[in-house]
């Protein structure tokens, strides 16, 4: 069990004037994030029936760093059984408010793999191309945001397909250390807009306008909504917002010593509170190819 650190959870991140409290939280957060770089994955014997110890370890890591890397037994060849096990696992983490997604199967889980299906063709998650930095559901309406998700590997790519992760609270620290005015700009309710988009089936996804940093309505913890895309996006036209967007565009690809990098093996996954992440491109190769399951939720991991 990890050591309690109430300083991390109690910090009022929206108060940009409380320097003393910020410095205490910053010190605790950076120390824990640095330690987390050396944490081994949480071992899970059975995704469908996690133990108290396994659940406590996962939830505590998500409370401290907003993510937990886990390793379970490699899934069987039965995809439906693997999907149901993943839903059982998510429910044990307190994730019950699942979103609907046009590409989700009957269990509500999206299969991320190279696909030529008309509804998936042209979308990067269903290709072998690299994915830039983003949070999930950045195009959703502000009242329809993604609080947490699970990314679970069924089959890894033979080559490539590496994911970098970044806790949004670390991004918050880097921005605040540069200039609190940048954070204030990114908290504006119209900081980032993604225009409407018509899906291949004719469904219209409305324009999405909202802040980059905002409070989770249940816990008050910091949440982030971001995409590094340069097309089909508009930023609020004021100097501080432009500077903040430019900072993130340079900072994220440049790397951070507190950015873990993982290539998920079969049975491994990342449980998280919708943290920033990307993915390198990967080789398609012969055989069935890379397959990851993703299930997204509107609430955070329980206790985090």
Image: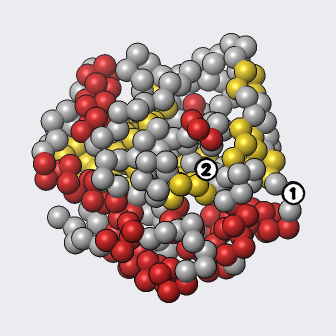
Q: Is residue 217 left or right of residue 228?
A: left
Q: Quadrant of the N terminus?
A: bottom left
- Apparent side of residue 285 relative to residue 300 in the rendered image (left or right): right
Residue 107 at x, y percent in the picture: 37, 20
Residue with the most extreme bottom position: 20
Secondary structure of the residue carrying tag 1 is loop
Residue 34 shows in the view: no
User: In the rendered image, is residue 204 in sight?
Assistant: yes
Under circle 2, the secondary element is loop
Q: Residue at x 54, y 29 (%)?
A: 114
**Position above or below: 166 against 8:** above
Q: Name the foreground residue: 266 vs 10.
A: 10
Direction from residue 237 to residue 71 in the image, left or right: left
N-terminal-most mark, 2 or 1: 2
The x, y position of residue 104, in whole percent, is 48, 22
Which residue is tagged 1? Answer: 237
In the image, residue 46 lies at what x, y percent?
16, 38
Vertical order, 136 against 27 (above or below):
above
Name the quadrant containing residue 282: top right
Q: Residue furthest top?
A: 201
Q: Is disc 2 surrounded by few (<14), some (14 to 19) or many (20+) residues within 10 Å? A: many
**Residue 225 numbered tag:** 2
């Amino acid at each position: 069990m990890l050591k309690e650190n109430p300083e991390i959870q109690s910090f009022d991140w929206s108060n940009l004037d409380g320097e003393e409290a910020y410095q205490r939280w910053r010190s605790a957060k950076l120390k824990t994030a640095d330690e987390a770089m050396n944490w081994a994955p949480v071992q899970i014997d059975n995704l469908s029936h996690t133990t108290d110890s396994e659940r406590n370890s996962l939830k505590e890591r998500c409370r401290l760093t907003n993510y937990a890397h886990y390793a379970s037994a490699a899934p069987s060849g039965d995809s439906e059984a693997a999907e149901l096990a993943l839903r059982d696992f998510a429910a044990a983490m307190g994730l019950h408010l699942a979103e609907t997604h046009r590409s989700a199967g009957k269990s509500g889980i999206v299969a991320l793999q190279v696909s030529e299906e008309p509804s998936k063709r042209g979308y990067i998650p269903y290709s072998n191309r690299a994915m830039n930095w983003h949070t999930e559901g950045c195009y959703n309406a502000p009242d329809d945001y993604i609080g947490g998700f699970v990314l679970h590997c069924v089959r890894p790519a033979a080559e490539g397909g590496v994911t970098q992760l970044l806790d949004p609270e670390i991004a918050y620290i880097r921005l605040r250390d540069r200039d609190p005015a940048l954070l204030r700009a990114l908290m504006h309710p119209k900081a980032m807009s993604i225009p409407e988009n018509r899906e291949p089936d004719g469904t219209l996804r409305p324009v999405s306008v909202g802040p980059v940093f905002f409070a989770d309505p249940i816990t008050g913890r910091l949440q982030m909504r971001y995409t590094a895309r340069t097309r089909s996006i508009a930023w609020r036209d004021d100097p501080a917002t432009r500077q903040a967007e430019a900072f993130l565009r340079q900072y994220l690809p440049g790397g951070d010593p507190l950015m873990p990098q993982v290539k998920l093996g079969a049975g491994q996954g990342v449980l998280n509170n919708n943290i920033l992440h990307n993915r390198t491109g990967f080789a398609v190769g012969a055989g069935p190819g890379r397959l990851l399951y993703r299930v997204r939720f509107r609430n955070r991991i329980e206790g985090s």
